[in-house]
């Protein structure tokens, strides 16, 4: 056992001595940055183990052969440190190689050896912005996603590597790319200008179910036009909106009471409705009196809420009637249309003690009275008044 340890120690010593002799004789690149996959590269630096130029030396030594589609300028920061500054920050999809020139020598005449090729990539195309925004919980069943990218992308690689993961569906769902007039119409409708920004519009090949988690997976292998691929998945999380429904509400004195007749009645929609439908919804009261709805903003074409303004007769029955063909902004039919016409009731007028005006004047030598309106007040209080 001891002889084996001694043998390994001797081998290690020989190997260490070889490395020491090599490092003393030959120069090498100590540091090269960046390497691998890096976004937003603006500068490349290399530091050598020995002095390459005398301080203040005007001559220039180019240590690398550069293979990169983006242009820049080389300079020596000091006698050991070389840098290459790009004219602009590099977009995605760029691969650059820096190859050490053969026969390159240091100031002392030692040849630079060791690793002679250094490479980096700015990675495959990535999503920098999405519409709807990531985390949105109101995604449509047929939602078209507008994705802003940091590089132009090979469309076939999108179709092969981008998909949706949908709650309740075990298989991944593919995408289709929106093009042509439909693309232009959508971009215009959401306010995107036709500029040089790289955007792709995607839609799932399958409708999303309501109230479901949806993940857009920008998968590993999506490729830029320059051939650089993504190396890992980028996942954006969303949630689809609920079904299109209408909900009635009004103010009540307590949960068991009916609507207070001097306050508004409201009908709220889970998604926006064109006013051409909203204006046809009516509240029908006693003696077939019809109450017309109003909206909060007269300049809005689509509404979430309509209001029926008071006063209403007390202890009365009403029906809210909705057109059978009502649709939301996505063309969906009302999921709870079977609940309408909806019957609602008003309660008695609430108790009231009210002066005729905000202030009153009592004459010094007058009878000292002011007009006061009482409604549904306790009888004993009436007598005291």
Image (cartoon, rainbow, N blue to C red):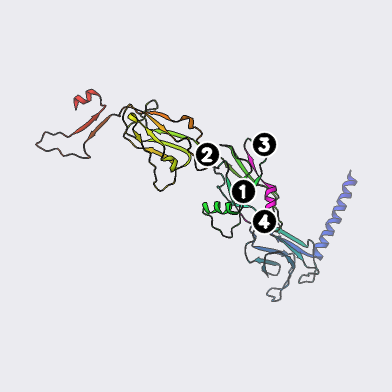
What residue would you read off at disc 1?
A: 202
Mark with earlier residue (4, 1): 4
What residue would you read off at disc 4?
A: 38
**What is the span of residues highlighted in magenta in the rendered image?**
149-166
Mark with earlier residue (2, 4): 4
What residue would you read off at disc 3?
A: 170
Mark with earlier residue (2, 1): 1
Inter-mark Cα distance, 2 to 1: 21 Å
Q: Left of 22 or right of it: where is 261? A: left
Q: Nearer the viewer, mark 3 or mark 4?
A: 3
Q: Which of marks 3 and 2 is in front?
A: 2
Percent across and percent down for residue 180 are: 60, 54
CB atoms of marks 2 and 4 within 8 Å: no
Percent across and percent down for residue 376 are: 26, 26
Q: Is residue 14 above or below residue 66?
A: above
Q: Left of 356 or right of it: where is 284? A: right
Crowdedness of circle 4 by 10 Å Cα count: few (<14), some, many (20+)? Answer: few
- Say which of 52 and 266 sits in front: 266
């Amino acid at each position: 056992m001891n002889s084996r340890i001694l043998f390994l120690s001797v081998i290690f010593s020989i190997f260490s001595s070889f490395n020491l002799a090599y490092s003393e004789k030959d120069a090498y690149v100590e540091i090269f940055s960046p390497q691998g996959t890096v976004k937003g590269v603006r500068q490349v630096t290399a530091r050598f183990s020995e002095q390459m130029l005398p301080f203040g030396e005007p001559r220039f030594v180019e240590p690398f052969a550069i293979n990169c589609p983006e242009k820049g300028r080389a300079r020596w920061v000091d006698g050991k440190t070389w840098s290459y500054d790009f004219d602009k920050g590099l977009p995605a999809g760029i691969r650059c190689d820096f190859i050490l020139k053969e026969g390159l020598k240091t100031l002392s005449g030692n040849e630079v050896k060791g690793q002679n090729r250094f490479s980096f990539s700015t990675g495959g195309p990535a999503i920098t912005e999405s519409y709807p925004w990531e985390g949105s919980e109101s995604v449509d069943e047929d939602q078209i996603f507008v994705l802003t990218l940091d590089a132009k992308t090979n469309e076939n690689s999108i179709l092969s590597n981008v998909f949706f993961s949908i709650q309740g569906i075990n298989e991944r769902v593919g995408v289709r790319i929106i093009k042509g007039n439909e693309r232009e119409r959508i971009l215009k409708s959401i306010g995107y200008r036709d500029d040089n920004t790289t955007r792709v519009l995607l839609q799932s090949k399958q409708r999303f179910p309501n109230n479901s988690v949806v993940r857009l997976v920008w998968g590993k292998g999506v490729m830029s036009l320059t051939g650089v691929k993504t190396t890992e998945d980028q996942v954006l999380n969303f949630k689809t909106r609920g079904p299109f429904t209408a909900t009635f509400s009004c103010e009540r004195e307590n949960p068991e009471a009916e609507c207070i007749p001097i306050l508004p009645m409201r009908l709220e929609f889970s998604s926006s409705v064109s006013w051409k439908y909203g204006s046809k919804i009516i509240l029908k009261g006693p003696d077939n009196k019809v109450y017309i709805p109003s909206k909060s903003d007269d300049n809005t074409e689509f509404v979430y809420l309509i209001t029926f303004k008071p006063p209403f007769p007390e202890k009365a029955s009403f029906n809210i009637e909705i057109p059978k063909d009502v649709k939301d902004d996505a063309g969906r039919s009302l999921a709870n249309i079977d609940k309408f016409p909806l019957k609602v009731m008003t309660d008695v007028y609430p108790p009231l003690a009210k002066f005729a005006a905000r202030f009153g004047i009592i004459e010094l030598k007058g009878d000292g009275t002011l007009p006061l309106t009482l409604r549904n007040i306790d009888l004993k209080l009436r007598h005291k008044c």
